[in-house]
Amino acid sequence: MTTRELPSLDLLKGFEAAARLLSFTKAGEELFLTQSAISRQVQALEDQLGIKLFQRRTRALLLTEEGERYYKAVRVALDDLRAATASVRAVGHSAILTVSTTVTFASLWLVPRLATFQSVQQGAQVRLVAENRLQDLDRESIDIAVRYCPPAIAGRGATKLFGERVLPVASPQLTARVKLAQPQDLARAVLLEYEGVPHTVWLTWSVWFETMKVPMPTPLGTLRFTQYRQIIQAAVAGQGVALGRVPLVDKLLRAKELVAPFGRTQTTAAESRAYYVVVNPRSAGRAEVRAFIDWLQEVVASERAR
């Protein structure tokens, strides 16, 4: 490689991710590549530079002194390049707004209401990124994130939308054929169970019954899911009783696609988590960003007033 020639952007991105995460595997997951592909990229970069960037140990990956120095320079260069790219895009497409949130919040709450934002903000273009992974707003060119997390993770300056409560929900067709007058009657029903990540343990039937101070009966059957939106799809289809996350299922309750057989009083809450709006500081001055946040708050206030 000549002194004027630069390594390819792909090699630099692979190296930056590996150096930041100190893992070829995690870097591959972030960049949607295999561990071996990241390893080859780093090896190719080391060959081009003529130096070792990492110390490869059995259970650890460490930067060399030269690797640490190069990582700091590459990180700054890539951040500047991302910022410049976002700035150019903003000039040419001032109405494009990138919003990130969880798959559950996107499918159950945001998407069913999103058309109303475009009706009040004519000409706005929204790009929705639905992922459960906590994303870096700068690195991934995201303007706004709606995150379900504790306040400490949301950070200073985040805007709280609402917390969550859960209550049993089922389709009207199911409650018409299965009498559900009290929690013990769930012994006659199939329960839809969520096998989510550890912080959603409060969203399990055992915890709900414990909170209600009612012994959990043996249900007619159990269907288990790893994606919450699949639970709600199964509940709407009449396949069993789910723990509905309020207000995520409010629209389905108002439309009578789901009903709360025991009313709205028998709920449990996730005290430590809520939905927060986090804004990329680079995007904070954009009119459409402010308009989107205002719209979110207006929708929440309007629905709470109901």
Image (cartoon, rainbow, N blue to C red):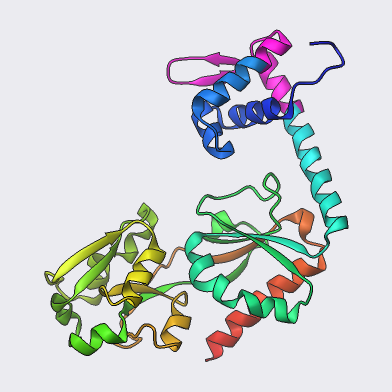
* Relative side of 166 to 20, left or right: left
Residue 48 in magenta stretch: yes
Q: Nearer the viewer, residue 179 or 163?
A: 179
Residue 33: quarter of image: top right
- In this rendering, the answer to whether 26 lies above or below 63 is below
* Relative side of 68 to 198, left or right: right
* Relative side of 208 to 215, left or right: right
The spot of residue 292 in percent (x, y) is 71, 71
The spot of residue 192 in percent (x, y) is 27, 67
Residue 52 in magenta stretch: yes
- In the displayed image of the protein, which residue is found farthest to the top? 50
The spot of residue 151 in percent (x, y) is 54, 60
Q: Which residue is at a point 68% across and 25% down the rendered structure image? A: 11
- In this rendering, the answer to whether 57 lies above or below 110 is above
Residue 41: quarter of image: top right
* Relative side of 90 to 301, left or right: right
Residue stretch rendered in magenta on the structure: 45-73
- In this rendering, the answer to whether 154 lies above or below 38 is below
Q: Which residue is at a point 80% across and 21% down the rendered structure image? A: 6
Q: Which of 61 and 221 is in front in this view?
A: 221
Q: Quadrant of the N terminus?
A: top right
- In this rendering, the answer to whether 279 lies above or below 184 is above
